[in-house]
Image (cartoon, coloured by chain):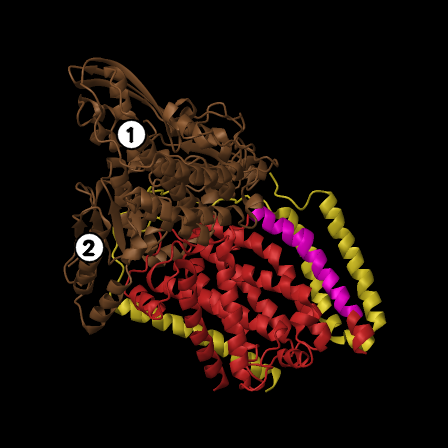
């Protein structure tokens, strides 16, 4: 039952995000757009390219959807509304998100097309850049909560949200979250102007519909992750807990979608350089800072 | 029924899906969105969603007359679009080898909008049909000779061979094993060195870091969304880095400069067809060349209004470039705003409206110059290795040269013109320079006080030779004509894009593919004026 | 729920997703099948028919980062359990991990000095 509710909420969120994305890219708000798009895609041919690696080609979109949903499965929408409250919650999120890379490399390699392949390998490089900035800020969050249970992590923010307690970690995690869902300015694997769709370019019809759905669910998942780990999850006055989680998550998703509209796409070279030269040292500083504050102030 | 209907006996479900499709038409634009905008079409405002690859498109939108090379490229794109698909022509008479357009309208915004309505009806009714025909143009057929020729530099000859598509889907699943056996075949020749890296990589070119990998040819154009429509490059990719570049000179089948031959009175009309991106410039160039030959003088007012028309076109052209470049570098807001202003400026009919639009353009320029991270995205990119000697126009002026034929024109001097010059010789300097020129051009338009464009050359047509030089938005263009009895008998054109295209190799080789594209984009090439 | 049941739920989700995707494909398939036509199954490359296979040994130019990434990724496996018990152990935990991270960070600095943090040309 809970599973069904959570999945429905995620799909509804994905729909809203799809509407928002259409708004962000075209400047036109069309509430019925994604639904019509989905139906239209079902009616179109789904081409399989010649001499493709059929297994990789088919698995890519499905794996992307699975990894986004698995990550969401351990995130609580309210104290009782979580699919599985794993003891390894925070680590599990990280594990599930690692498969995003696998899915995209498969989708890039599968069709045997040059734009897709460059896109897929680019995303592998992107993972090498952002991955540490998912893990390290999460460690600092777990230090404060003394637990990897996601519910405990939200409860640990009762007095002060993590976004204020460890703002540095929040900024780093938010940037990494943008990179995970390959949203602009980190849309290196799909880059419309450079790779004409990249890893998505060879998907058509129903397969493209699944790929786009997976991408939208991924954005929602990352928005909920940011909410749960940094924005106090369901914590808030008056409104019911689930409404707080949803409201905050949609706000985060909107910021994620619109942030990249005003800056040029990052160069792969700079992405790796900046994330390693500044991101990782700062993430270590964040762990140290949280460690000291926890010893000195909280005890 | 539409030309690319999908085979099915339509039931209620098909009809429902067809109606959804009709409401969400995705267009792949040929030659490209940049050409559509230059011709005054706002595709998205009319209700079509522009997409980056034919794979995601349901409508192939043809804009204007297409030369043969582009029609063939369009046929390939059409073949790669999943059904149901349709052809929508705006101002395109000859579409072969494509099937007859499902909807064909004149080239203007109002006709585009009505055409889309018609297309929606056609889609809703005819997206599925019981009897359909394959699209089998010659360009999409297997060509064994090509196959052989294009196979250079590859170890695995066995996939992508002819006859592959007859194989069933089950066979395709076995592909990974097939690839392995391909490598074994190589090994069989020298069993003792089976899978030895030294053997496998012998004689292959090495990258900068000494690693020897396989290089892959990657077509970029003629219908690549990040490049000017019609511009055709082929990168040889070593990983994600360009190891070699081939530039196709111009567009196959595009009208040659010999179109100018003929009666002088209508030369401006013919010249305008030379480049759909900047028709006014070519009108003026042709008129001036003929006037030079006949020795005719034009009045000061005429000179001023020509300057006004030319500078309006320059501002619009630079805005169009900014829109395309913004798309290439992934800056959505820059791209959309520039496109909107370009279309608005092209619609302007009198000088007062230019004054109204000017504030908005200046605001755009200010904001675009302050875009965050521009320096890291564009700085140092697009610097050709052997300097800018050959470069023309903004590319030269962004490298510190004062090359600008407007400086010698008395009309421009009276308007207080001075060339804007920047140092840097990279994409960043070119970006800044063009944006500053937009504002400067609008000032010149207001100073000139008129924007009427040239219709026909002044004076009596006679015999003789004439030369004219005009600073087009892309650089200095020179036209030499010979007249005989009121007819042009020879014409020779030196266009700036031909010269700037020589820089392409220097700005792409050994760059990451995105940086290479930014470098090419910053040159603002027009494939239409590149000579074949 | 026991841990095993929880993982069973997750497995059920995976199966459910696969089932969902297959049923979507099934619905799409009911509308007709993909027609085989010349050129359609060639990957789209901007209007040129490029039949070349592109599977090749790909030159990934971020391998310098990738090597360092391995070291850091392994290290992070130790960080999670440490993070959970950090407040319990207090200063000792901070010092222990401090020494460990310092060594790792020195590795990062060494890699930096050796030019690992740049695109390999």
Q: Which residue is mark 2?
A: B115
Residue B162 in sight from this viewpoint:
no
Task: Specify whether A117 is left or right of C78.
Answer: left
A69 or B450, nearer to the observer: B450
Q: Nearer the viewer, residue B311 or A295?
A: B311
Chain A as rendered: colour: red
Give the colour of chain B.
brown
Above or below for B296 versus B165: above
Tell me which secondary structure the magenta stretch mostly adopts: helix
Magenta range: A268-292
Query: Pointer 1 indicates a residue of which chain?
Result: B
The spot of residue B39 in percent (x, y) is 28, 43
Observer-nearest of B26 and A72: B26
Q: Position of residue B82 (x, y in %)?
A: 28, 56
Give the residue at x 51% y 57%.
A260
Residue A70 x, y percent position in the rendering: 53, 73
Instruction: From this view, report whether residue B476 is shown above or below residue A281.
Output: above
Question: What residue lies at 36% left-to-right and 70% top-to-bottom?
Answer: A31
The residue sitting at the top extreme is B464
The residue under the point 51% across, 68% down is A253
Q: Position of residue B481 (x, y in %)?
A: 26, 18
Nearest to N terminus: mark 2 or mark 1: 2
Q: Looking at the rendered structure, which numbered label has been put on residue B301?
A: 1
Q: CA distance from mark 2 to mark 1?
A: 40 Å
């Amino acid at each position: 039952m809970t599973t069904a509710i959570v999945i429905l909420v995620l799909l509804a969120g994905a729909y809203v995000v799809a509407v928002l994305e259409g708004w962000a890219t075209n400047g036109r708000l069309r509430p019925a757009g994604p639904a019509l798009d989905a139906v239209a895609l079902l009616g179109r041919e789904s081409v399989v390219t010649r001499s493709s690696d059929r297994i990789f080609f088919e698995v890519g979109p499905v794996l992307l959807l699975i990894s986004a949903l698995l990550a969401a499965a351990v995130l609580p929408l309210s104290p009782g509304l979580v699919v599985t409250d794993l003891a390894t919650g925070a680590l599990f999120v990280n594990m599930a998100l690692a498969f995003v890379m696998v899915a995209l490399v498969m989708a890039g390699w599968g069709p045997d097309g040059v734009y897709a392949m460059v896109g897929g390998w680019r995303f592998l490089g992107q993972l090498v850049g952002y991955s540490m900035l998912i893990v390290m800020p999460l460690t600092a969050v777990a230090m404060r909560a003394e637990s990897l249970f996601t519910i405990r992590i939200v409860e640990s923010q009762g007095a002060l949200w993590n976004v204020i307690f460890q703002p540095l970690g929040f900024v780093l995690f938010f940037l990494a979250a943008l990179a995970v869902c390959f949203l602009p300015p980190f849309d290196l694997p799909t880059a419309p102007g450079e790779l004409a769709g990249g890893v998505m370019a060879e998907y058509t019809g129903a397969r493209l519909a699944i790929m786009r759905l997976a991408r939208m669910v991924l954005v929602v998942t990352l928005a909920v992750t940011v909410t749960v780990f940094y924005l106090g999850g369901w914590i808030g006055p008056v409104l019911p807990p689930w409404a707080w989680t949803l409201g905050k998550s949609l706000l985060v998703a909107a910021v994620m979608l619109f942030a990249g509209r005003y800056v040029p796409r990052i160069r792969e070279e700079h992405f790796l350089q900046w994330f390693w030269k500044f991101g990782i040292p700062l993430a270590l500083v964040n762990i140290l800072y949280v460690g000291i504050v926890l010893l000195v102030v909280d005890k | 029924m539409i030309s690319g209907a999908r085979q099915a006996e339509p039931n209620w479900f098909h009809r429902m899906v067809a109606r959804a499709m009709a409401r969400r038409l995705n267009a792949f634009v040929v030659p490209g969105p940049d050409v559509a905008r230059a011709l005054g079409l706002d595709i998205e405002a009319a209700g079509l969603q522009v997409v980056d690859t034919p794979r995601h498109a349901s409508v192939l939108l043809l804009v204007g007359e297409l030369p043969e090379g582009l029609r063939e490229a369009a046929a390939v794109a059409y073949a790669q679009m999943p059904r149901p698909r349709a052809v929508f022509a705006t101002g395109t008479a000859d579409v072969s080898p494509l099937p007859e357009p499902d909807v064909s309208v004149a080239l203007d915004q109002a006709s585009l909008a009505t055409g889309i309505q018609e297309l929606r009806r056609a889609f809703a009714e005819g997206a599925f049909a019981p009897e359909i025909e394959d699209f089998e143009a010659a360009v999409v057929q297997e060509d064994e000779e090509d196959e052989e020729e294009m196979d250079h530099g590859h170890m695995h000859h066995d996939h992508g061979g002819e006859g592959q598509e007859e194989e069933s889907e089950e066979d395709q699943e076995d592909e990974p094993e097939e690839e392995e056996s391909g490598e074994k075949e190589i090994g069989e020749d020298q069993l003792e060195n089976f899978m030895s890296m030294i053997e496998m990589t012998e004689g292959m070119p090495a990258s900068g870091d000494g690693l020897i990998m396989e290089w892959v040819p990657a077509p970029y154009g003629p219908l690549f969304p990040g490049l000017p429509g019609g511009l055709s490059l082929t990168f040889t990719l070593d990983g994600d880095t360009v190891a070699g570049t081939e530039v196709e000179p111009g567009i196959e089948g595009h009208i040659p400069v010999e179109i100018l031959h003929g009666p002088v009175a209508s030369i401006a009309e013919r010249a305008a067809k030379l480049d759909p991106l900047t028709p006014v410039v070519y009108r003026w160039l042709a008129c001036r060349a003929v006037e030079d030959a006949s020795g005719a003088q034009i009045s000061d007012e005429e000179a001023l209004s020509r300057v006004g028309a030319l500078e309006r076109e320059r501002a619009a052209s630079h805005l169009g470039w900014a829109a395309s470049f913004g798309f290439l570098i992934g800056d959505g807001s820059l791209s959309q705003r520039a496109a909107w202003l370009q279309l608005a400026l092209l619609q302007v009919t009198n000088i007062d409206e230019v004054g109204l639009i000017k504030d908005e353009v200046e605001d755009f320029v200010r904001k675009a110059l302050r875009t965050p991270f521009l320096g890291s995205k564009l700085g140092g990119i697009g610097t050709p290795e052997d300097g800018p000697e050959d470069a023309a126009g903004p590319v030269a002026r962004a490298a510190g040269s004062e090359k600008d034929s407007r400086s010698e024109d008395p009309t421009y001097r009276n308007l207080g013109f001075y060339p804007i010059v920047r140092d840097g010789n990279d994409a960043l300097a070119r970006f800044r320079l063009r944006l500053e020129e937009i504002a400067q051009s609008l000032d010149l338009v207001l100073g000139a006080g008129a924007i009427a464009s040239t219709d026909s050359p002044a004076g009596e047509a006679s015999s003789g030779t004439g030369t004219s030089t005009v600073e087009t938005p892309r650089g200095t263009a020179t036209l030499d004509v010979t007249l005989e009895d009121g007819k042009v008998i020879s014409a020779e054109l030196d266009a700036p894009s031909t010269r700037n295209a020589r820089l392409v190799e220097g700005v792409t080789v050994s760059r990451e593919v995105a940086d290479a594209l930014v470098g090419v984009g910053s040159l603002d090439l027009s494939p239409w004026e590149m000579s074949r | 729920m026991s841990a095993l049941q929880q993982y069973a739920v997750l497995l059920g989700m995976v199966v459910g997703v696969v089932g969902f995707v297959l049923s979507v494909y099934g619905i799409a398939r009911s509308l007709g099948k993909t027609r085989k036509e010349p050129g359609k199954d060639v990957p789209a490359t901007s209007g040129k028919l490029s039949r070349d296979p592109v599977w090749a040994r790909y030159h990934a130019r971020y391998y310098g980062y990738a090597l360092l990434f391995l070291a850091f990724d392994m290290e992070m496996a130790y960080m999670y359990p440490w993070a959970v018990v950090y407040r319990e152990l207090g200063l000792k935990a901070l010092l222990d991990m401090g020494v460990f991270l310092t060594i790792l960070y020195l590795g990062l600095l060494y890699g930096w000095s050796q030019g690992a943090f740049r695109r390999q040309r």
